[in-house]
Image (cartoon, rainbow, N blue to C red):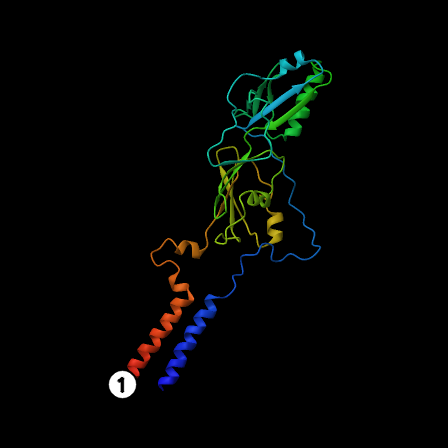
């Protein structure tokens, strides 16, 4: 009888050990992907101008003196803001010596451009802004052959939570995907939840909308409206239960094999004691 109880106790301990050593299922990205599979995104979304954006707009012509009429140049500290935690991806226009003054889009989506006056550019891509200004300069017979270069000066996203390097990332690209953004932050840590990545997107009108993306489901990722990110998007990776338990005094101790071996041994000891006392 004593031997049977010991065997039962050991079996229970082994059962807990095996369950604690099982392989997690929600770690690998794109678990449903197949060889040669083709993906289609919901739509290709480029970065578009919205209120409070800052842009560098430079007009070049064959006559340098004429070019200066359409360019805001002043001695100043570069306006692209950053903090100690800001990372920059790609080259952002700086006017050579940081002396380019940036246009700030007002609440109505307008900027005050030299000679042309107030122009509405909200909702345009930087290529569309460039074409629009170029066409206006030609149509009003101001310049015959202008080259208009437009760059965003403060295009950035914020990545928080369980990634290797959280923080704000400035980038200078027309399009940025959520996968590229996660790569910029050094990928998720092993404790990040991959099935419920939160993206918060401001709409420019004082409201924000939440989206969730499942990185383990390839179709969910590519069909998501936030597959292509916009400026000021916030990505948050929540911690898994293991990470949360680390904030408590006992942490993950009850989930370790050694704990259950000890519990199994304790159970065998108690069972043996009870059997001995009841004989």
Quarter of the image with the C terminus is: bottom left
Image-based side of 99 in relation to 20, left or right: right
Q: Position of residue 239 (x, y in %)?
A: 45, 51
Q: Position of residue 4 (x, y in %)?
A: 39, 84
Against 210, residue 56 (above or below) is: above
Q: Position of residue 155 (x, y in %)?
A: 56, 33
Q: Position of residue 166 (x, y in %)?
A: 48, 43
Against 139, residue 21 (above or below) is: below
Q: Which residue is mark 1?
A: 278
Residue drawn at 68 percent across, 25 percent down: 131
Q: Is residue 225 visible?
A: no
Quarter of the image with the N terminus is: bottom left
Image-based side of 148 in relation to 12, left or right: right
Q: Name the secondary structure under disc 1.
A: helix
Q: Quick one: which residue is furthest to the top in this view?
A: 65
Choose top left, top right, bottom left or bottom right for residue 259. Answer: bottom left
Choose top left, top right, bottom left or bottom right for residue 148. Answer: top right
Task: Count residues near mark 1 (Cα–Cα under 10 Å), then give few for <14, some for 14-19, many for 20+.
Answer: few
Image-based side of 148 in relation to 108, left or right: right
């Amino acid at each position: 009888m004593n031997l049977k109880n010991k065997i039962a106790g050991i079996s229970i301990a082994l059962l807990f050990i095996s369950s604690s050593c099982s392989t997690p299922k929600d770690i690998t990205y794109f678990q449903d992907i197949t060889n040669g599979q083709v993906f289609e995104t919901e739509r290709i979304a480029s970065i578009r101008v919205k209120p409070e954006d800052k842009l560098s707009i430079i007009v070049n012509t064959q006559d340098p003196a004429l070019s200066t009429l359409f360019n805001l140049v002043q001695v100043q500290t570069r306006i692209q803001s950053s903090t100690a935690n800001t990372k920059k991806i790609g080259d952002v226009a700086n006017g050579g010596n940081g002396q380019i003054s940036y246009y700030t889009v007002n609440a109505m989506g307008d900027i005050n451009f030299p000679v042309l006056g107030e122009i509405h550019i909200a909702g345009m891509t930087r290529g569309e802004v460039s074409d629009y200004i170029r066409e206006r300069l030609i149509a009003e017979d101001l310049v015959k052959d202008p080259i208009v270069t437009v760059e965003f000066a403060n295009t950035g996203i914020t990545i928080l939570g369980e990634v290797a390097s959280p923080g704000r990332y400035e980038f200078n690209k027309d399009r940025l995907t959520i996968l590229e953004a996660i790569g910029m932050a050094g990928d998720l840590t092993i404790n990040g939840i991959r099935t419920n990545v939160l993206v918060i997107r401001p709409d420019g009108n004082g409201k924000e909308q939440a989206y969730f993306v499942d990185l383990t489901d390839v179709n969910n990722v590519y069909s998501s409206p936030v597959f292509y990110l916009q400026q000021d998007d916030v990505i948050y990776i929540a911690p898994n239960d293991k990470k949360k338990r680390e904030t408590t005094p006992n942490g993950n101790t009850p989930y370790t094999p050694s704990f259950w071996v000890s519990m199994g041994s304790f159970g065998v000891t108690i069972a043996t004691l009870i059997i001995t006392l009841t004989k």
